Amino acid sequence: MPYHFSQKSLLLLFVLTGFSVFAQKDLKLQYQQPAVEWTEALPVGNGTLGAMVFGRVDSELIQLNEATLWSGGPVQKNVNPDAFKNLALIREALTNEDFEKAYVLTKNMQGPYSESFMPLGDLILKQDFGGLQPDSYHRSLDLQTGLASTNFKIGGVNYKREIFASAPAQCIVIKLSTDQLKKLSVTLDASSLLKNERTIQNQSLVLKGKAPSHADPNYIDYNKEPIIYEDPSGCRGMRFELIVKPVIKDGEISSEGNKLVIKNASEILLFVSAATSFNGFDKCPDSEGKDEHQFAEAPIKKAIAKKYDSLLKEHIADFQKLFNRVSLKLNEKETNKSNLSTDIRLEEYAKGEKDAGLEALFFQFGRYLLISSSRTHNAPANLQGIWNNKLRAPWSSNYTTNINLQMNYWPVESGSLSELFFPLDEYIKNASVTGTETAKSYYHANGWVLHHNSDIWAMTNPVGDFGKGDPMWANWYMGANWMSRHLWEHYEYTGDVAYLKKVYPIIKGAAEFSLDWLQKDKNGHLVTMPSTSPENMFYYDGKKKGVVTTASTMDIGIIKDLFENTAEASKILNTDSDFREKVNKAAGELLPFQIGAKGQLLEWYKDFEEEDPHHRHTSHLYALHPANLISPLKTPELAAAAKKTLELRGDDGTGWSLAWKVNMWARLLDGNHAYQLFKNQLRLTKDNDPKYKRHGGCYPNLFDAHPPFQIDGNFAGTAGVIEMLMQSQNKEIHLLPALPDAWTDGEIKGITAKGNFKVDIKWNAGQLTQAKIVSQNGGVCSIRSAEPFIIEKLNIKSEKSSIGYTAKFDTKKGMSYSVVPTK
């Protein structure tokens, strides 16, 4: 058995913070060996600083990131002045169904590539154990405290390392300790893949460096240097600084070159801080506007004045204020496997072993990652959250807005983490500024537009290095519209009218662009042209492959959704009645959704054969999820067509694709099918073992495997579990709408429904036993359930509906209402 020590101090800590020590074991990732691959290391983060902890014995590696460390600088205006002259020619070609010509012309409407998220550096802790191997070893990450620990025993000495990323302290804190005095001798070193210089200053390890002024994405190779540090035509790259400050008990500190050497200490505290010269999306990062040294040094000066226990207590209190709002229990009568290593649990799960505890752990891991990666102004969680170890990260680890960035924030409201929406909210505001310029210069249109790739500089133009990108992904025009849904949903969940008033001009701006973008077809319908269905192709005229077309179903669904939300916002704010009438009229003239020969919802305006029938994107089902234009309740015929589409697509896919399908099947009220896709999300994937194919699933550290790693699948998987257990579209709270048979018993507490209702649900033998609704705003509450029920105290009985039973009642702010089934 692995050695665990300081149980008394741990128990005291949990007593002080008000949580039972016995509840912690079920929410831990744990392993009996160090990480070999990056996708086996354990993530900690405070929203700005991120670390991947490998847990190595004699040469610990802690890989570091800072959320604002990106290549590049502010976007340039009017980067492709010749773009607009192609638009009329493209539309003429599409009218004539000359898809090949439209494809070629569309490439002329591209601009530069977006920039890349950069790795900060590595912190290396070397300890010489004379070649001895550990007698015992254990490493873990406690999701409920955000504390990563590594314990091992060598030569009769028990060693312990603890690491957490503190939001209150704005630094990473590392504690090294043993059960014997003066047994810690450690050499501290740091490195970075970026240009840097290391020095020792005031017994601190300091690494200063600079990000490149431009970095091409890693999936493009033009036989040229991908990294450009000095760009005389623009900004010269972002500066950054990393500081590691040791504070020791006993022993001595000295320097050896650019390394710090600590000998014979009884305890070592390391304070890690970093900052960049990023000073806003529209300011050059090599200017003198922000002193990164001051921003890196200030948190350490404050932190070293406090005791470790105080820092840890403040961190846990801050973290648990967010994390502990939601709890999930599943099938607790099953054998509890929380004492097993997480990688072993995943291996057994892949063989068909039941492990509802692992499923609940994966759900909470998504919430943990969002808390850890979405707390920095103007820098929402990117394609890898805030964790990246590569100079050229997969897909630049940027903001991919044709699904992936949005997916990161699906659980932010329903998962009761609404405060963590602010980085995305700020990014959308920034993109509406740059997107206004793009709409004007590229399309001579009003409002704002956002294409499929973006970055911390809020780039909005279609990327592709001026014609080298494939329009299949580069020339997609609906990003502003989709992002506006997140602004609207934040209002729907919070009921904050003042917020809605603030963001209404941004939502309206997206609608204004769409009104200018839409064209009349020969039948009088409003359509988009050019149009694409992200990253997919179709066959026409036999076996010719087409990409650019007219009126993809995704376009129509997104615009219809946007128009409905814009009109509703205008009505709530009692403003803009003329514009409301305009978008309502346009919404009624949009090309209707169409059903194909196979009974499926068409992806394009014609029943084209798909080049890849099992394509990972299910973009044409946007209207089903995340929107609510298609549902079994409101549009049963279209819902049946959506179901057929999902059946034709199949149950395989990349990690994030599986997660989207979980949510879609839940919206179709098919819990068993949603659960099958959710199980597929937990298929073990390994970078260093050919036995595990590189399929979509998750890595040993539960990171989502596209593969490679993309964090969006983690977030969407968490949202999908909530969709199975509670939905709040159709202005009602649907209890257990898609409960899978596998989850016979369970309880979820603290999730949020639209209208700002907090919801607890308990079920047994597959049926609701009790629900509690807390009204945080007041107002009307509508409940739907599969079985008849009563609202206790109010004595309101449910009535039979086309789907289950419903009841509606007035609520008072702050009051709690119990929902119990009736026979």
Image (tube, helix red, strand yellow):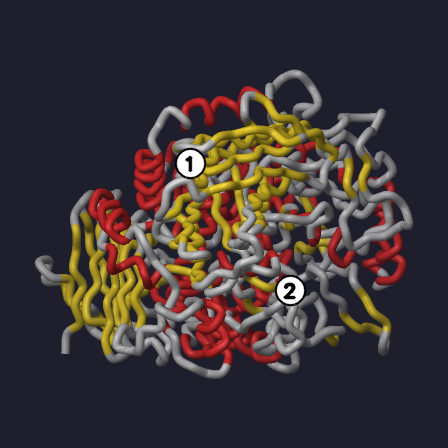
Give the residue displayed 78% in from the left and 59% down from the top: 548
Q: Is residue 705 above or below residue 7?
A: below
Element marked by disc 1: loop
Which of marks 2 and 1 precedes in the sequence?
1
Q: Quadrant of the C terminus?
A: bottom left
Residue at image x 69%, y 38%?
Answer: 459
Q: Is residue 305 visible?
A: yes
Residue 401 location (% of width, % of height): 63, 50
Q: Which residue is mark 2?
A: 707
Q: Is residue 392 above or below residue 792?
A: above
Dividing the picture into quadrants, the one containing residue 16 is: top left
Residue 645, located in which quarter of the rendered image?
Answer: bottom right
Q: Position of residue 215 (x, y in %)?
A: 77, 41
Q: Residue at x 75, y 45 (%)?
A: 462
For the residue marked with disc 1, what is the amino acid?
Answer: Ala
Nearer the observer: mark 1 or 2; the answer is 1
Judge whether residue 576 can be spotted in this image: no
Q: Nearer the viewer, residue 811 or 376?
A: 376
- The one nearer the camera, 682 or 799, is 682
- Binning the other alpha carbons within 10 Å of mark 2 as few (below 14), some (14 to 19) or many (20 upward) gives some
Residue 563 spot, x, y in % from top left: 54, 48
Compared with 632, 204 (above or below) is above
Q: Amino acid at mark 2?
A: Pro
Depth check, front residue: 41 or 761: 41
Residue position for label 1: 167
